Image (cartoon, helix red, strand yellow):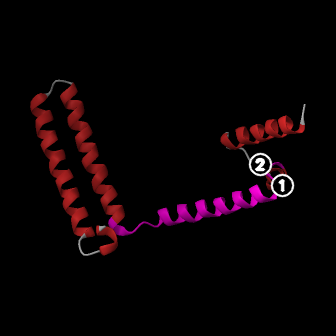
Amino acid sequence: MSDNKKRKAQLQHVLERLRGGKTVQNRQLRTLLGDVAYAQFEYEWREQVELRETLKNKPAEVAEYERLLKRATFAYSKADAASRRGRRKAAAEMFAVADTQFERLVDYLGEQIAGKADLEA
C-alpha cells in the first residue's frame, strides 16, 4: 500500500473514531495532519470553544425571544394537529391563539430592535 493510501486509511479511521465520540490523541492527529494542518485545527477548535461559550451566555432579550418563539411554535403545532384530526372548530381557535402569540413575538422583537442602529440594519 502506498504511503498516500495508508495515510488516507489512517485519517479515515481517526474520522470514524471522532464521529463515534471516541477519543483521539493529539499526537496522532498532529502526525497524520502535519504541523500546518494541526495548527489550523487547534485554531478552529479554540474558535468553536469560544463560540459555544458566547452562545451559552445569551442576553436576556434573546432568551426571552426564544422562549416566546417556542411557545408560539408549540401553539401552532397543536392547532395543526387538531386540524389534521378533523377538529375544525378547535383548530380554528388554536390557530387564532398561535397567530396572537406570533404577533406578540413580532412586537417584542420590534421593541428590542428599535433605536439600536447595529440591529436595525
SS assignment at label 2:
loop
The reply to whether discs 2 and 1 touch (Cβ–Cβ < 8 Å) is no
Q: Quadrant of the N terminus?
A: top right
In this picture, residue 14 sits left or right of residue 60: right
Q: Position of residue 88 (x, y in %)?
A: 12, 29
User: Which amino acid type corresponds to the residue marked 2 in the rendered image?
Assistant: Val
Mark 1 crowdedness (10 Å alpha carbons): few <14, some 14-19, many ≥20: few
SS assignment at label 1:
helix
Which disc is residue 8 wearing? none
Distance in Å between CA atoms under marks 2 and 1: 9 Å
1 inside magenta stretch: no
Residue drawn at 20 percent across, 36 percent down = 79
Residue nearest the viewer, comparing 22 with 10: 10
Q: Position of residue 80 (x, y in %)?
A: 22, 33
Tell me if residue 26 comes above or below residue 14 in the rendering: below
User: Which amino acid type corresponds to the residue marked 1 in the rendered image?
Assistant: Arg
Which residue is labeled 1 in the image? 27
Boundaries of the magenta span: 32-61
Residue drawn at 73 percent across, 40 percent down = 17
Q: Position of residue 28 (x, y in %)?
A: 83, 50
Which residue is labeled 2 in the image? 24
Tell me if residue 90 comes above or below residue 57 in the rendering: above
Q: Position of residue 52 (x, y in %)?
A: 54, 61
Tell me if residue 80 comes above or below residue 64 in the rendering: above
In this picture, residue 120 sits left or right of residue 13: left
Q: Residue furthest top?
A: 86
Residue drawn at 27 percent across, 68 percent down = 113
